[in-house]
Amino acid sequence: EEYKVLTTKVSSKLLTSAETAAESKDALASVNWGAPKVTGLSTEEMAKRIDTGLRNECWFVTGRSMPELFSDSFTFSDPQVSLNGIEEYSRGVRSFYKQGTAVGEIVCTAATAPSTITVVWRNYGTVNIGPGFDLAPYLVTTTLKTSASDGGLIVKQEDAFEVNKAELVKYNLFKSKRPALA
């Protein structure tokens, strides 16, 4: 795990999960980390599987991923952190988001270039920092890269988003003035 921003490293030490460690482990117990890999899919076929999987269980928030679609060399990065492995990624998002309140809504998923799948999704809800910190709704663009030399599996995930920190603080301080979510 590599933190790109000092404040992210500090705040990661403040993670307080609503789930106990045992509950979190149990929640991911049915994920088959050693599942046989599904190789040989075209980028379009992989995009369809990703879309179906995310709409059934948005692992970007729940951590309940589909390891059979990810290479053993999978890497993740966003503006704040980088890490290796689908299991490490899944456990990380599981502990970061307050389960039952955090939401990942898939807007669209498409094969956008050779070996590239783009997912646009809306993220909001509560994260487990301190007593809980609410995220105002914002869009995330996730770029998934597949590799033919790795059987067409996902080798890289990069999340891009912009969050106005002043607006985020205001969102948490003035809860009564929040717009209603549709």
Image: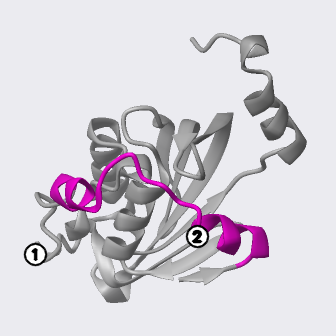
Label total for image = 2
Q: Which of the pair 52/101 is nearer the observer?
A: 101
Spatial CA span between label 2 and label 1: 35 Å
Q: Residue 36, labelled with which disc? A: 1
Residue 73 point in image, percent of width and height: 38, 87
Can residue 5 be seen?
Answer: no
In the figure, is residue 11 to the left or right of 1? right
Say which residue appears at 28% left-offset and 46% top-offset.
53
Q: Give residue 57's quadrant in the image.
A: top left
Q: Which residue is mark 2?
A: 13
In magenta segment, residue 78? no
Say which residue appears at 84% left-offset and 31% top-offset.
170
Identify the secondary structure beneath mark 1. loop
Identify the secondary structure beneath mark 2. loop
Say which residue appears at 66% left-offset and 64% top-offset.
11
First reached walking from the N terminus: tag 2 or tag 1: 2
Tell me which amino acid carries mark 1.
Answer: Pro
Whether 46 is drawn above or below 9: the answer is above
Q: Give residue 45's quadrant in the image.
A: bottom left
Say which residue appears at 54% left-offset and 38% top-offset.
126
Q: Which residues are magenta?
A: 4-27
Tell me which amino acid carries mark 2.
Answer: Lys
Quadrant the C terminus occupies: top right
